[in-house]
Structure formats: C-alpha cells, structure tokens
C-alpha cells in the first residue's frame, strides 16, 4: 500500500502543476513537478526495501510518470508560451507522446534478460523525471533572469522542447544513480555537499534547479564514453569500482602518454621488448636482454666474488 500511495501522490503533484500554471503561479508549477520527481525516486526503493513489489505497482508507476513528466510539463509549456499557437500545441503533443513511448520502451527492457551486466548502470535515453524538468528549463530561466531574452522566444522554446523529446526516445546512454556506490571515506564530504545543495535550493531555488539540470545534460558525453569503454572491456563488468579504475588506468593512461611496457621475466631472466627500425625503415621488436647483460657485466662480477678489478690501461676500450 505504501509504495502505491507514494506513486499516487507523485501523480497528484504532477497534475497540480497544471492547476498552478492556470492560476498564474509558474514557480509553484515547477516545484510541484520537482516534488513529483522526488517521490518517483522513492516509491521504487521503498517497494524493494519492504519487499512489496508488484505488477500493479509497476504499471501504476509508468502511468504516473506519463502524467507527471509527460502531460503536465507539456500543458505547462503550452499555457505559458504556446497558448493560441497551433504549432506550439503540436510541439506539446510531440513531447507528451515521446515521453509515453520512452516509458513503454523502459517497461519492455525490464523483461530483457540478454543485456550485458553493465547495462544496469545506464538508462537508455534521458529518464522521465530528468526529461520533464529539463523541458521546463526555458521557463526557469525566464523566472530567474527576465522575460526579455532569446531563451523565451517561441522558436527557441519549440526547438528546446523537441530536442528534449528526441533525447527521451534516443538510444543515448545516461548514468543511473541507482547503481552508484559511495566509498566510506566520501560519505562525510557528500553529506556536507548535500547540506550546501539544500541551502542553495532554499535560498535560490530556480538557480539551483537550473544548475542541476545543466550539469545533468553535460554529463551525457561522459556517459556515452563510459558505456563504449565498458562494452569493449568485458573484464571490467563484474569487478569493484577500485579494480575497474585500475583497469582503466592500465588501458588508457599508459597508451596516451606513450609509456614503455614494463619488463617481463621469462625463464628467470629480465627481458624487455623495445621498438627498433631495420634497414627498410620498418619498425621491428628486438629483445633488450643483450643490452642488459652487457651493462651488467662491467665491474659487477668482480665484486660478486670479492676480487678487486684491475686498473684500466691507457689506450684500452674503457678509456675511449
């Protein structure tokens, strides 16, 4: 009962955003959708903690997300910017439809058992709460900066809304915060950061929300790069984060800096392979063990058996 009640509250918060917009309270509308996003992140976790997951809860969660982050933001944008504009209504419809399609694809991916292990660390496309709030970024900037600017023109708002809708149904991977594990030594600094974020939200709510949305959109290139790296390195799929970082350093840093590979011991002797060029100008690999033996043979064998090396005579190779 408790997880489903939280889902219903999130749906009511999303629908209340439309009522706040009709009443001329856009800040309250944005706050209502933000509250719906927070509740949406809690209902699934509470259901798993209480072992109260059900098929009905999953379907109810998808319907609530479609209303709170698809229908409600589309209507808020239409009432704020596109009212009386037919093209604006089409843009609002496109956003709502893309949000519903994104949620339908998410439900189908839940039953896919052939995904690689690292797939649980990513979402396919921008998730619904982030997409619903990101679509309202022009409205947030208008409330914070003012009405006279390019950020609230009809063309810019339409292009932005269609762009966010495209990210919703795209195959671009984005990071899933559900799988991020915080090390013990980072708990205290992160709690301090949470306190600072809470203070910023209370003092400057629109600025804090806009900053979080911009940072989230800027992380997409990193998520794409991380997804591609994991796809090419199966040895890093099921290892702890510390070992994964070591694998990344071993595969990436040495090659970028042009470092030579470490010497390997073969049959009890230290040997390394260094690149050389033959007479035709082609690069070949030659063992460096002879060089090591030549340098090791000068003066060290005498010390090993306790004898003093003879003084070098003028004109010998040692003086040249």
Image (cartoon, rainbow, N blue to C red):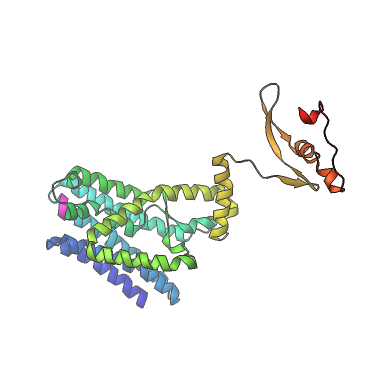
Which quadrant would the C terminus be assigned to in this image? top right
Residue 57 image-quadrant placement: bottom left
Give the percent coordinates (x, y) of residue 63.
Answer: 32, 64
Q: Is residue 78 magenta?
A: yes
Residue 293 picture location, percent across and down: 79, 39
Left or right: 173, with 217 as reference point: right
- The residue at the point 81 percent across, 28 percent down is 314
In which quadrant is the N terminus drawn? Answer: bottom left
Q: What x and y, as percent, mark residue 65?
A: 32, 62
Depth check, front residue: 211 or 35: 211
Is the magenta region chiefly helix, strand or loop? helix
Quadrant assignment, res 156: top left
> Left or right: 98 with respect to 256?
left
Which image quadrant is residue 46 in? bottom left
| Residue drawn where x is 20% and y is 62% of the image | 29
Q: Which residues are magenta?
A: 77-81
Examine the rendered structure and indicate whether residue 255 appears above or below residue 233. Answer: above
Question: Can I make out residue 171 in this image?
Answer: no
Q: Is residue 308 magenta?
A: no
- Image coordinates of residue 202 in percent, x first then y, are 24, 66
* In this view, 305 is above or below 183: above
The residue positioned farthest toward the top in the image shown:
280
For image coordinates 70% across by 21% down, the residue present is: 279
Is 226 on the left or on the right of 162, as rendered?
A: right
Q: Is residue 152 left or right of residue 106?
A: left
């Amino acid at each position: 009962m408790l997880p489903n009640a939280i889902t219903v509250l999130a749906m009511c918060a999303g629908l209340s955003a439309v009522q706040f917009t009709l009443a001329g309270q856009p800040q309250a509308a944005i706050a209502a959708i933000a509250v719906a996003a927070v509740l949406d992140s809690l209902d699934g976790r509470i259901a798993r903690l209480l072992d109260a997951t059900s098929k009905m809860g999953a379907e109810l969660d998808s319907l609530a997300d479609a209303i709170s982050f698809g229908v409600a933001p589309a209507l808020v944008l239409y009432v704020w910017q596109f009212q009386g504009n037919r093209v604006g209504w089409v843009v609002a419809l496109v956003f709502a439809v893309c949000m519903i399609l994104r949620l339908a694809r998410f439900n189908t991916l839940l039953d896919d058992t052939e995904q690689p292990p690292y797939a649980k660390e990513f979402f396919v496309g921008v998730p619904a709460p982030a997409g619903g709030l990101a679509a309202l970024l022009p409205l947030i900037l208008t409330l914070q900066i003012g009405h006279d600017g390019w950020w609230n023109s009809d063309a810019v708002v339409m292009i932005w809304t269609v762009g966010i809708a495209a990210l919703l149904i795209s195959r671009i991977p984005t990071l899933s915060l559900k799988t991020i594990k915080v090390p013990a030594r980072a708990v205290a600094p992160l709690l301090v950061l949470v306190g600072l974020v809470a203070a910023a939200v209370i003092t400057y709510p629109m600025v804090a929300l806009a900053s979080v949305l911009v940072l989230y959109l800027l992380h997409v290139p990193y998520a794409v790069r991380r997804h591609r790296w994991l796809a090419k390195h199966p040895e890093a799929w099921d290892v702890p984060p510390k070992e994964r970082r070591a694998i990344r350093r071993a595969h990436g840093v040495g090659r970028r800096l042009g470092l030579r590979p470490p010497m390997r011991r073969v049959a009890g002797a230290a040997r390394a392979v260094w690149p050389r060029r033959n007479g035709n100008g082609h690069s070949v690999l030659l063992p460096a063990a002879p060089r090591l033996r030549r340098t090791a043979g000068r003066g060290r064998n005498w010390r090993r058996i306790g004898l003093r090396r003879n003084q070098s005579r003028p004109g010998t190779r040692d003086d040249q």
